[in-house]
Amino acid sequence: MKIGFLFSGQGSQSVGMGKDLYENFIEIKKLYEYAEKITGIDIAKISFYGPDVELNKTQSTQLAILIECLGISQILKKNGIVPDAMAGLSLGEYTALIEDGVFNIEDGINIVSKRGKIMQNFTPKGNWKMAAILGLDDENVEKICKNISYGFVKPANYNTLGQVVVSGEEQAVLNAGEEAKKAGAKKVSLLNTSGPFHTEKLSECSIELKRELDKISINSKNSIVIKNLDGKYYEEKDNISEILAKHIMNPVRFTECLKTMYESGIDTFIEIGPGKTLSGFVKRMKFENVKIMNINDVSSLEQVIKEVKENG
């Protein structure tokens, strides 16, 4: 059995997330308390009780997802379940880098908090939207975006086979969605996001983030973490702060991350964090002979530990 951890990204959050984990595992409770001490933000309260408007603020969202994911990962490792590869969706890449020791936990929590704040404060003003287009190949979606004559819209996330998220000005995104339907898209879903994430419109965010990344100690190494930027493993020679600064204003190539995992021999994919989005992405890849599990509460955590120990 070769195990890949997949860490959730922004958009999977919901009020109540992580509460039963916090109540059942002292290690996870301590992690929430530690994050509050570092950032001054009561992540437990926001995660468990909201309200939605507070949890959906980018800084709160990113911290809430990060802490839940780190907590689950800690319990898995305590039970001898250690990954052979890791990847995360956008924000989730930071979780993976902390887990692999590229960032220490204090710096990791701090940089995610600052990243969220930067994305809140430096995203350009305007009516921005993101939409997931299902059922068209990448080239078709790229062509549709290119042909939108009015406004800005670009592919932002290549999530899995037949699913691309586009990002940009609201009207241009809506127009791209209409064109996608005409071209045979099965579904177009508008996402609950507030910026043109993973496009060049976030160049100012990228500069600010690079400044913050340059202040912290980064342990560059041949890592088991796969980059969103190009779907390849991090290597010792990589300039990680530069990669992560680019990451925020370039498309997430998650399809490539999943392919790299599978080609590396990963046969057990464990999604860690709220929701089941990433498990769905793996299913759509149609890999042969793989097991897909997800953990977002105490019962699913216990079930995965039991299954892996029985089959490992």
Image (tube, rainbow, N blue to C red):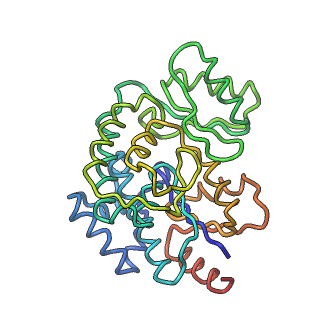
Q: In this view, does 169 lie above or below 222?
A: above
Q: Is residue 217 left or right of residue 65?
A: left
Q: Where is residue 123 in the image (x, y as percent from the top left)?
A: 35, 33
Q: In this view, does 161 lie to the left or right of 117?
A: right
Q: Position of residue 232 (x, y in %)?
A: 58, 52
How many numbered marks, from 0 up? 0
Q: In this view, does 97 lie above or below 210?
A: below
Residue at the extreme top: 149
Q: Is residue 295 above or below residue 53?
A: below
Location of residue 252 (image quadrant): top right
Location of residue 207 (image quadrant): top left
Q: Foreground residue, 82 or 67? A: 82
Q: Is residue 81 left or right of residue 219?
A: right
Q: Position of residue 26 (x, y in %)?
A: 34, 81
Q: In this view, does 287 lie to the left or right of 107?
A: right
Q: In this view, does 191 lie above or below 292?
A: above
Quadrant holding the C terminus: bottom right
Q: Position of residue 29 (x, y in %)?
A: 33, 74
Taking the spot 61% from the left edge, 24% from the top edge, the residue there is 145
Taking the spot 38% from the left edge, 52% from the top edge, the residue there is 62
